[in-house]
Image (tube, rainbow, N blue to C red):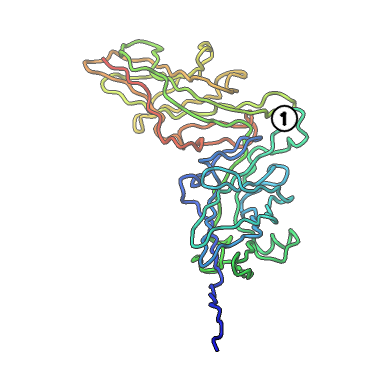
Amino acid sequence: MNTASRAMTLSSVGTLKVELKIDDQKADVNTYLLAGSETTKDRYLGELVFTTENEPVKVKTLVLGRADGANCTDSDVLAVRLYDKDGVMVAQEGVSANGHANFDSLNYTFPADQATSFFIGVVAKTINAENDPEGTATFGHTIKYTLATSTQRTELGLSTTAVTAEGVDSGSAITMAEDVNATIADNEYSSWKDATSTEAAITGSVLNSVVNSLTDGVLTGGTNKTIGKYKFVFNNGTNRTSINEELKAKLVELKLSVATSSAEVTNVQAYIEGQSSIQTTAVAIDFATKIATINLTQLTGDTPLVDGEITLVIIGDVGSPGTNAYVQTSIATLSTDFTYNGNAGTGSNFTGPRLDVIEVIGGTLSN
């Protein structure tokens, strides 16, 4: 008598690691976030790496908590978003009063035996935009996230960990735990003590780019010679002041590097192209550093308040140049050498625009 038999395959229960990282070039720098806008594709706050083994894993919930040192609230943040590697949004949630984001119905299935990245982005509320009842963001408030702490989860009324998951094939719950030694093991996620996102600071006006706009030319001696031109592009979105005026950026300071050969440059000044009658006070070039520190707040009246595209013209007195002489200006270290205020001059100034550009080299005048 033959007895039929069935073959049974026992699969291992899946495992999951969730790591918050900031070493990907899409999410490795602090930024200024224009109020009323969302994070751009190459300026995310952080990367969440979900690594699975043995079977596909469904991440059911995910909780992000406001990091220590940040002060954003639900008055500042409209939504926190998760994006895939191609910049496609896969989930979004509003935030609690203290800025925490509870993705309580994420229910995203990650394929087996792979590492998959989600990137953290945010949408900021406007600052006093017309006809916007949610235009409540505050200039200078900062946004940073971790995987939520136990205290933050309790605040949200949760008794679960910051990540909950289950194996898709096995149907088994995966018990997740917060990492305790800065080495993410199976079924662990990054601790708030060890892994924090980058920072996005809310601003009413943001500097988007700085480029040289002076064409190389012939160097001649004389007074009030143009030795540099730099184009700045600002954006203030729909943001407005508390008295319903357009919220503009305010120019504060430029540390201009000046390289010369035999030509002596003195009395360095700046003005905004088209407004040559309003100039900063003339300054000397520091002998040791070769830097002329220009106080842009000396542009009188509302002149330092800017939006859109402006060109800053640099002039100086050039002594009689010798043979093969040259003058070239630059903003040598953009992160320290240009300061502006993103709130019409109120609140803290931004030293360094948090752009990807390190240095802006000006045109060369030579003979």
Residue projecting furthest to the front: 1
Task: List x then y, in percent, for residue 331.
Answer: 41, 30
Q: Dot 1, how many residues are within 10 Å of its Cα: few (below 14), some (14-19), or many (20+)?
A: many
Quarter of the image for residue 283 reads top left
Query: Where is the N terminus found, in terms of image quarters?
Result: bottom right
Mark 1 highlights which residue? 129
Towards the viewer: 1 or 78: 1
List x then y, in percent, for residue 62: 64, 58
Q: In percent of the image, x 67 and y 64: which residue is there?
A: 150
Q: Residue 159: image x %, image y %?
A: 72, 66
Q: In this view, does 51 lie above or below 98?
A: below
Q: Which residue is drawn at 55% across and 81% down?
A: 5
* Observer-nearest of 347 and 319: 347
Q: In this view, does 122 lie above or below 62?
A: above
Q: In this view, does 339 lie to the left or right of 124?
A: left
Quadrant that contains the C terminus: top left
Q: Which residue is drawn at 74% across and 58% down?
A: 156
Amino acid at the residue labelled 1: Ala
Q: Position of residue 170 (x, y in %)?
A: 60, 70
Seen in the picture, residue 188 relative to 349 is either above or below; the reply is: below
Q: Nearer the viewer, residue 308 or 103?
A: 103
